[in-house]
Image: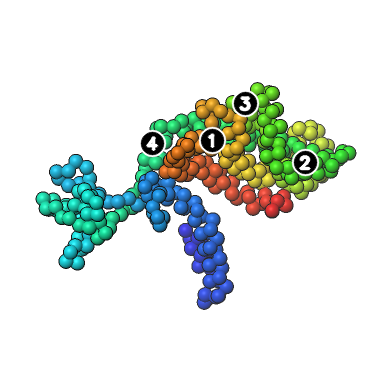
Amino acid sequence: MTTVSTFLTRRRGRRLHVTDVLTYLYLAAGVLIMFGPVLWLVLSSFKTPSALLEFPPALLPTAQATVTVEGYDTPLPLFDVTLEDGSQARLAQVRRIGLEAQMIDPAAPDEIISVPTAQRQEVRRVQFAWNNYTEPLARFNFVTFLRNSVVVTVTATLITLLINSMAAFALSKYEFRGRNAIFLLIIATLMIPISVILVPVYLVITQIGWTNNLWGVILPGAATPTGVFLLRQYMLTLPDELLDSARIDGASEWRIYWQIILPLTAPALAVLAIFSVMWRWNDFLWPLIVLTRSELFTLQVGLNSFQGELNIQWHYVLAMTVLTLLPVTVVFAFLQRYITTGVATTGLK
């Protein structure tokens, strides 16, 4: 907290300068733009279905207040009512007949008061709909979807780091004919849209027999030109003399790669790991094409099951979306200190 308060109160001199004000306004606008949608998502995930459809929409999850009155089986909704003499009263509605509502005072429920509906206003209170989280966990195979997503993300990330680091090692530390042409060819694949290769890759997966198989989701995207470029640029900064010294000491090429190159490339590997986790965790289209059995669905495909032909259960979709954000947030929190170093030293902008 001391570090945060020092940062927030830092200024150019003793008095607040106009540039300090502009800086704070700029930072506040950036925080609002970046985290405003996330805050809205989290708060909306606790709203009831009726609260989600309200207009104008409210930021906080609210619901109409109710009160339990003796003699009535269910809690009655509360309203602030303007009576005929102009006074205000908080009454509970028993029933509504046309444009007139029959209401009672919860403290004296024996007397029925007829009030025009235009003279009453709902009493709303902040209320969190926790059942948005508990009901999907009980009604849908959320744990199965989560397990499949974790398996796909972790396995694909490990394979991506291994394959891309080996390719980057060869392209950065070995001299052979056609090295630059191969690198340019790999980089050129960035220009090919995913939609172009979707059908050929699916035909290959079908021939291999990996439809309805998690390997069919994991392997097609394991080798990425972005990963090769990022790691190669970082490995170029490592001195070749270090590798020559290891060879003089008798180290094999595999040992140089495994015990020297990989540890020194940790910041770039962390950046690629974060990218890979985000790509695989949020991937929807390819798993939707390859997987048709519900027990193999990943979380993103499983969320699609909340969408029916005529009705979309937005309260469940928002709540489960918040849960799917948590693993990526945790990974980012642990590896975020490597991002600046990795991006700055690899030339990735």
Kindly identify which residue carries mark 2: 186
Are the residues flagged by discs 2 and 3 in contact, CB closer than 8 Å? no
**Residue under the image location 14 percent in, 45 percent down:** 70
Q: Nearer the viewer, mark 2 or mark 4?
A: 4
Residue type marked 1: Val
Looking at the image, which is closer to me, 262 or 68?
68
Instruction: Give the amino acid type for the residue marked by disc 4 in the picture.
Output: Glu
Which numbered disc, 4 or 3, marks the residue that appears first in the sequence? 4
Can you identify the residue that label 3 sits on?
Answer: 211
Q: Is mark 1 on a helix, strand or loop?
A: helix
Near mark 4 (Cα within 10 A), the count class, few <14, some 14-19 or many ≥20, is: few
Q: Distance between the residues labelled 1 and 4?
A: 18 Å
On residue 135, which mark appears?
4
Residue occupied by mark 1: 301
The span from disc 2 to disc 3 (Cα, nearest Å) is: 27 Å
- Amino acid residing under circle 3: Thr
Q: In this view, does 105 lie above or below 263?
A: below
Tell me which label, 1 or 3, sits earlier in the chain: 3
Q: Which of marks 2 and 4 is nearer the N terminus?
A: 4
